[in-house]
Amino acid sequence: MSGLFTNVPNFALSIGGDELLLGAPQWVSAAIGITAVITLLVIVSYARPETSGGVRFLAGLLKLAAIVMIAICLLEPMRSGSRPRPQANVLPILVDNSQSMQLKAAEDAPSRNERVSELVDGDAEWRVRLAQAFDVRQYAFDARLESVEDLAALPADGYVSSMASSLKSLSDRFSERPIAGVLMFTDGNLTDLPSADYDWSQLGFPVYPVVPDSDGALTDLRIADVSVSQTDFESAPMTVTVSVDAVGIANEIVFIQLRDLATGKLVEEQSVRLTDEGEPQEVRFRFRPEESGVRFYDAIAFLGQDRELMQDSEGDETDSEEATLLNNSRVVAVDRANGPYRVLYVSGRPNWEFKFIRRALQEDAEVQLVGLIRIANKEPKFSFRDNKGVNDTNPLFAGLGDAEEEGAQQYDEPVIIRMGVKESEELSEGFPDSAEELFAYHGIILDDLETEFFTQDQMLLLRRFVGSRGGGLLMLGGQESFDGQAFGDTPLGELSPVYPPRMTSDKGNGPYLMRLTREGLLQPWVRLRDTELAEQDRVREMPGFLTLNSVGEIKPGATQLAAVENPGDRREFPALVAQRFGKGRTAAWMIGDLWRWSMRRQKDDPDDPGQAWRQMAHWLVNDVPRRAEVRIESNSDPSQPVTMVVNARDEAYLPMDNASVELTIEPLEGESFTMSATMDESEPGTYRATYWSREPGGYRVSAEVTAPDGSFVGRDESGWTAQSGAAEFAELQLNRDLLAKIAEQTGGELIAEDQLDQFAADLNQRDVPVTETWIYPIWHQPWVMFIAVLCLCGEWGLRRWKGLA
């Protein structure tokens, strides 16, 4: 009979993991004395020589054994140990419910999920034994941790494996409850892998991963990575780079397709051969999207024999040699920023440059060029002999009618024409003198202008346009450009990427031959050819230029992209220099007659000058902020939400608080819905909202910003892709190393599937948070008296047999 005692005797002797106790140690002396006396009497009684010594010895030994056992019972010997207190310790059983558990090593083999379903059946002996001693809880995890009633009925259809966060959730959930450990069934291929130096012992409980003896070799082809790059080339062509690798497949041809998801149209197909070493192979798709904005494409990789399976949305994966086809495709989001972008061209005199720039940008639907050209300076530069002081208007406007003459420039005002304006009032007062008017443009081109053309306030406004608004400024060479120290002391000189000349420099006479520097060759908006050799050949065919502005040294942080050389003395001068300035960018062309290039078209590509101007315009307006902008902050963990960040600015491009921001989210497959973004208290003018992409695929979001007074501020769109399959099937083999690391750091161990019964039996002997002391009274057991009686009966029978009784 077993029992529990609160007062454990002090006298104890450790034997193995238990202790041997004496309940009545005060009887030790008496028991020894009684045993000694009786032993002496037995020895004396068996000292008679009537029988053989062997019989006497055996009979005496049996009697002494019975006497010793009875004497020991006087001391009340007991056995003591510790065990888990029944139902006091929580024991969660955690099962992976992600799609990777559907993988199988062979076609006729059970999947990982089917194997686990058999093991975790509620009637299994190991589960019954654990339930007797522990508070067993059942959980499944994929994107998040969930309590379930039947672990054997899990469908294994989750898109991700959030094992790390699920273990952390268990730690938080039972932070005030004792946990004996976590028994975990998973392949170890988690999608929320923490940093390499993460210490799993922070969980606070041992983890016991259950693993098979072997998982078999899997064959698989997958898209390892997809990247999108956009350059400042004409019409913003895109480059989509797709990287593929394989396991168990070598020296095979792999086909990669890029398809437009909206139309299903095939953009391009390429092929690549896998190497024997299994190194990833890359292909690049360079194309021009048919429309601006956010578009989605599907990158698909497949072997030749799987072509029909990949094109059939209901294809059966079991017909493929691969373990899964779910990692053979990736959705790609391409955000080709849409215009219109507005560029203001300001020139001090009519020239050929404006004609060719305007002609080039007319072919670009995304860039609108607005011209502000001075055709005559103030009156002191003109002498009209027929002017008798009859009126004060400039004679250039005479004869145009009363309405025109009323708005004509006065004698002390320059004559300026406007071209490409949207409204009649736009630029009617000349160059803008307010931030609201100037900041409506994304880029500004200044051509052949002296600093006196601007007021001091207008130059400071230009500085704000670049530094604070983030606009682009391009300075073209000419007679009045970069004009000495007077230019350098103004805000325009501060914006210039080059210092003014210290003194008049002797540049010699042209023609000047241009070349691109190493930095220029690396800039996609500067070069026009795909290779360095072709680009150098193109530049050598350019005509010689005759006009070059004198400038000083290049400013720190600026980059020289092109230079010109005087063939007469081989001296070199900067031709194109660019720099970052505040939030924006500035560039300067020191060549004053670039129009000569447009006059002399090249044979292989007569539109080179036009393409160059279009690329330069795109660079000028690239990354220029708008009043309303939305961007996506994705998380590397696909189980975590994406954050949509909206920036709202007023007409002066200062942060706008208390705006209303409405987001419309459009899944590729599903209905759109709207939600509101809330203001970020730490960043003025910033609004945030989060969204969980439960289904894989593409998502488009449009943000509409309304000012506090109800006026419309702006609208912007962006998009993202949920690539849960890419993360879930990044690795297919059982991640035994990671599971062993988790078990080691938490104090657990790897448990083989066929050792679950032994584990359930041994868990009672392991260290658990809540235990109780148990005491087994050895002296009070029937078998003790039975052995003592058996010894006495044996001794009596032996004496009767030998005639000693």
Image (cartoon, rainbow, N blue to C red):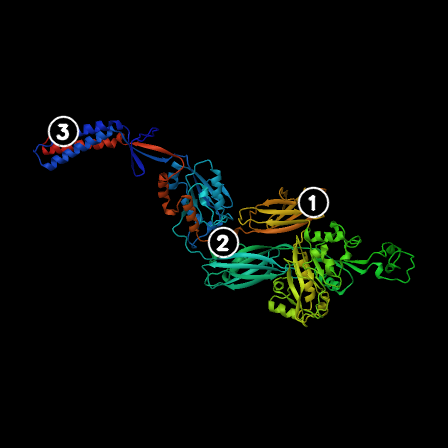
Residue drawn at the location 34% of the way across and 28% of the way down: 7
- Is 352 placed above or below 693 here? below
Query: Can you give x and y, in whole percent of width and height, for residue 54 in the image?
Result: 11, 37
Along the horizontal axis of the image, is 536 left or right of 184?
right
Q: Mark 2 points at which residue?
A: 730
Q: Is mark 3 on a helix, strand or loop?
A: helix
Q: What element carries label 1?
A: strand
Q: How far apart are marks 3 and 2 (CA)?
A: 84 Å
Along the horizontal axis of the image, is 599 left or right of 158?
right
- 10 Å crowding of disc 2: few (<14), some (14-19), many (20+): some
Q: Name the residue under label 3.
A: 41
Task: State the residue lying farthest toward the front.
Answer: 503
Residue drawn at the location 62% of the way across and 43% of the way down: 682
- Is 86 placed above or below 230 here? above
Q: Earlier in the sequence, mark 2 or mark 1?
A: 1
Query: Can you give x and y, in whole percent of width and height, for residue 661 in the image?
Result: 66, 44
Q: Earlier in the sequence, mark 3 or mark 1?
A: 3
Q: What residue type is labelled 1?
A: Thr
Q: Which amino acid does label 2 sit on?
A: Ala
Residue drawn at the location 53% of the way across and 57% of the way down: 310
Tell whether label 2 touches label 3 (CB within 8 Å).
no
Task: State the residue lying farthest toward the bottom.
Answer: 568
Along the horizontal axis of the image, is 321 left or right of 53?
right
| Quarter residue 361 falls in | bottom right
| Quarter residue 549 falls in | bottom right
Q: How far apart are marks 3 and 1 (CA)?
A: 112 Å
Tell whether label 1 touches label 3 (CB within 8 Å).
no
Which numbered tag is attached to residue 706? 1
Q: Distance between the residues labelled 2 and 1?
A: 43 Å
Q: Earlier in the sequence, mark 3 or mark 2?
A: 3
